[in-house]
Image (spheres, rainbow, N blue to C red):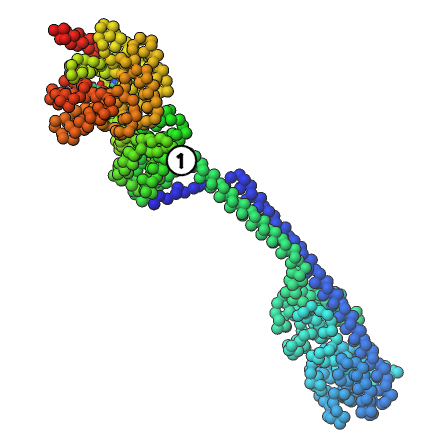
Amino acid sequence: MVADVPVITNPTSFTRLLRNSVLALIIGGAIALAAYCKHSWDREVQEVRENLLVQSSFLATASQSFFDNVGNGLKPLGQLLYNKNILEDPEASRSYLEDFSDRYPEVVTIAVFAPDGRMLINTGAKPGQTLPDFRKDPPYLTNLLADMVNPSSYVIGQPEFGKVIKRWRFTIRRVMRNESGQPMFLMQAAIPLEKEGTFLHQLPVPPNSFIGLLRGDGLQQARWPAKEPSEIYGKPSEGPVAQTVRNNPNILSGYVEGESLWTDSKGFRAGSFTRLSRTDMYAYVSAPWSYVWQQWWIHNSAVLVVSVLFLLVTSLVAHRIWTREKLHRQELLAQARRDALTGLPNRAAAEEMIQFCIDMSHTLDRKFSLLFLDIDRFKDINDSLGHATGDRLLIKISELIKDSLNEEGMVSRLGGDEFLIVLPARDVDTAVDIAQRLIGVFRKPIRVGEHSLVATPSIGIAQFPEHGEDIDTLLKHADTAMYESKRQGRNAFSVYMDQLGEKVLERVELERMLRDALEQNLFKLHYQPVVDMTTGRIVGAEALLRWVRADGMIVMPMSFIGVAEESGLIHQIGEWVLHNALEQVKAWNDAGHNLWVSINISPRQFQDPNLVEKISSALDMIGVEPDQLGIEITETVAMLNPEASSRILGRLKEMGVRIAIDDFGTGYSSLSYLKRIPADKVKIDKSFVDGINLEVDDTAIVHTILALAEILDKKVIAEGVETEDQYNALHALNCQLAQGYWISRPIPPDDFTELLGRTLLNRAA
Ligand code: C2E
Ligand code: MG
Ligand code: MG
């Protein structure tokens, strides 16, 4: 259910550089390509135009020579017709006329007119067929009579629909004159316009080109192709060539661009035109823009395709590098957010997660909780078993927490032995359930190599928004609650309360005061006698620490040993206790008593690698026999690392120091360890003594401990004996030693000396 914290990755300078370079390459490439396209296009247009110009000039030359050819060829024909007396007998000349039109395939018919406009003969009409009389057609006649007197050697007529040949054609006319220059007759060669094989379409022009001849007066002389001649001929042209020529009457050649108005194939075209050398006429060729495009593509596609491919490949490669880099960056970021040892999210990731939860909670209006978990006395494990084992234990612990969370939250390692569990959308009740579950899970020893270690957690719980509305406050308060759990004796959980904050302050203050107490020698030892139940005599004393404050108030060890432990002050305090207790027991024994004194060794002290040396040198220095000193450790301490414990205890026992297992029955009693720990005594915890003769279970436990101790050859001290009944019951169960308020409370040394004196007196009496 726990979403991964969203990763925000900012591009590195490398990706930025890569991105900018690629962008620059693409933009630069695109600009260069565009410039190249523009340039090559202009060049292409120019090339097409020039080619068209060459074609139009070729067409102009060809047309001029065609006209000259026909026009001049009519001259000898005229001479022949004159000789054959055509005016008198037109039919006699028919074969000469047909010969002429055979020689010029473009010429289909030849007609001859008398000076008054009468048609004498037309090869298009059969002999005897009635010929049209153009004298009744005034416009035609006017034109004909005008041509009769035209001084040019020949006249090219505009296209017309031929009345005899019934198709569109234009004419070339030549007048035959007598010596005095009077017109004798006019020969007219008709050149059809639609007929294939005219001079126009033999030109090798681009596909879909228009080729044609435009008269100086703006009318089309000839045109190829011309699907609907009536649309084209006989009407003034408004096309681009006509416009250009009209605007520049003296122009000899040029380029045009534009739409050809009278064509069925609409569209923009490029064209060129050239004036005929001796005729007021222009030859032109125009090609569609699509042709220009095609040409351009044919000439440039290779460069274009290669450039585009290059840009594409470059972009692809850059994109790949880019995404790789992004992944790499994300990986790095993920690593930066992971704890190297356990693989769990680290503090940074935890804080991100908390921020994420805060944001989510704001939008969804929901609570969430934090569990701050600290492993009790982890430092001791590290100190005694080494960091490698400590690390392995941490890995095991991280797995343990993760497994028991069932995906309900995100566990992270904040550092050292501190873990943080974020429970999104879970309130404090769920957090408490989980804390209890975790404490249960930690009860089982954890195997690390050959060690079987018991690590207990202290847990602090804080809930958003009640216990803080920002990361720092939430973490601080969860941490405060965790310390409260420690204060309550560890292996516990606490939910943050406002007052806890004050307790933290107290803790810091307490630590400072303890330091002062140590410096100002404000610690005192009280002694509680231990009596032999068979003789009733005091055989030993347990030294119990007291802090006598400046105001005279006595502070009990339970209120400060925890802080002394956490702060490490316990080492100095412990040494002070050792020396004082030894000096005291020496004083008593020097005065003739035969006592041992036992001191309490706290877990942290027990991890001190120099513990054995410190004890033995103190014994030497003060001059106390080792068997007059006893040390008390709890089974939990011994169990923390049974191998090391039995090693240290073994050395102490060899020296002769007595060893007692304190508070027996309350910790993780393990028979096998009990057997291995070289203790002389077992101290039955007060809680069992309390229930003796009242609770069946407690009586049974005491009974069992006694039986067990007998088998293992250890003596038993019953702690916290408060009543005579308890004393008698224990005595009946064959318990050897007893300690408790019923015998004596822990008392200052002077009182103890007095007590000893009294018992001596008693004995003497
Ligand atoms: P402990 O070692 O189990 O000591 C026995 C505790 O039980 C003492 O509490 C003692 O006053 C109390 N007691 C003895 N007889 C009776 C009884 O009949 N009824 C009741 N109700 N209590 C009885 P005290 O002195 O407050 O010490 C508490 C604990 O503080 C000790 O438990 C020991 O674990 C620790 N401690 C005391 N002195 C030292 C010290 O010098 N160094 C270290 N490391 N720990 C110490
Ligand atoms: Mg004790
Ligand atoms: Mg005890």
From the viewer's perspective, is 381 left or right of 332? left
Q: Quadrant of ligand 1?
A: top left
User: Given the current orientation, which residue lies at the most extreme bottom position?
Assistant: 128
Q: Position of residue 681 (x, y in %)?
A: 24, 20
**Pointer 1 residue:** 342
User: Given the current orientation, which residue lies at the most extreme top position?
Assistant: 591
Q: State whether label 1 is within 8 Å of ligand 1.
A: no
**Residue 710, placed above or below residue 280:** above
Q: Position of residue 128 (x, y in %)?
A: 75, 94
Whether residue 11 appears in this view of the structure is yes
**Residue 700, placed above or below residue 764:** below
Residue shown at the point (34%, 28%) measured from the top left: 378
Q: Nearer the viewer, residue 448 or 428?
A: 448
Q: Nearer the viewer, residue 252 or 454?
A: 454
Quarter of the image that includes the N terminus: top left
What is the three-letter code of the residue carrying label 1? Thr
Residue shown at the point (21%, 24%) measured from the top left: 710
Q: Give the structural element (helix, strand or loop) at label 1.
A: loop
Q: Position of residue 394 (x, y in %)?
A: 37, 33
User: What is the quadrant of residue 562 in the picture?
Assistant: top left
Q: Position of residue 278 (x, y in %)?
A: 80, 71
User: Given the current orientation, which residue lies at the most extreme right position?
Assistant: 179
**Residue 163, placed above or below residue 247:** below
Quarter of the image that includes the C terminus: top left
From the viewer's perspective, is 310 left or right of 251? left
Residue shown at the point (25%, 10%) measured from the top left: 585
